[in-house]
Amino acid sequence: MRYIKILMTASASLLLASCSTTYTISREELYRQVAAATPKDVVTKIPGIVVPARTEYLANGVKQLVVKDKKGADVSLENSPRIEMRITDNRHRKHILYFDTILLSDSTFTGMNSRFLGTRKKVRYADIAKVEVQEGKKNFHYKGE
């Protein structure tokens, strides 16, 4: 039993050490930054096992996303298909979306939760309790990068 606890502790430590840095952004700041940007059409390259895939979609047009680090300092992240966000709603449900796909319409954010399936989720602004952002380790790029 002791060895299992040691193994679990070591595994958890390795997992946490390999995770990307997580940032936060208030729902008001998220609204302001997305509302101020001009959406644009983009093409994303997604590496594939046999053939690379590509997706075309309307991106939010945010150039630099300003977020807070764990100490509360401002950090500017260049928007890219690798930026992921986790929205926790007032019912404590988590919605994981790709940031560049987040669009705002009638106080509702809509964004892709899968680039491969092209599926989208909606989250009402009023329902947002917390927003976390991180640069994922996925090898997604805009065509031409």
Image: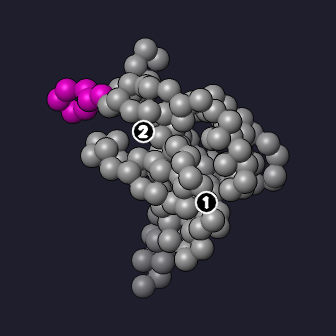
CA separation in Å, label 2 and label 1? 27 Å
Label of residue 78 in the image: none
For label 1, the SS is helix
In percent of width and height, residue 39 lies at 53, 31
Q: How is the image coloured?
A: one colour
As rendered, which of 15 and 87 lies closer to the eye?
87
Q: Nearer the viewer, mark 2 or mark 1?
A: 1
State the residue at coordinates (52%, 43%): 103
51 relative to 84 in the view: left or right:
left
Q: Quadrant of residue 91?
A: bottom right
Mark 2 residue crowding within 10 angstroms, few (<14) / some (14–19) / many (20+): few
Q: Say which amino acid is labelled 1.
A: Tyr
Asked whether residue 40 appears in the rendered view, the answer is yes
Residue drawn at x 59%, y 55% is 107
Residue 125, numbered label:
1
Kindly identify the amino acid type of the residue bearing the numbered disc 2.
Lys
Q: Residue 101: x, y in percent?
A: 47, 40
Give the left or right position of residue 142, taking residue 25 as reference. Answer: left
Quarter of the image with the N terminus is bottom left
Give left or right: position of 110 versus 88. left
- Residue 78 spot, x, y in % from top left: 62, 30
Q: Is residue 129 magenta?
A: no
Determine the residue located farthest toward the front in the rendered image. 106
Residue 12 seen anywhere in this rendered image of the structure: no
> From the viewer's perspective, is 125 left or right of 139?
right
Measuring from the top left, give residue 109's x and y in whole percent: 53, 52
Furthest residue to the top? 144
Q: Which mark is residue 138?
A: 2
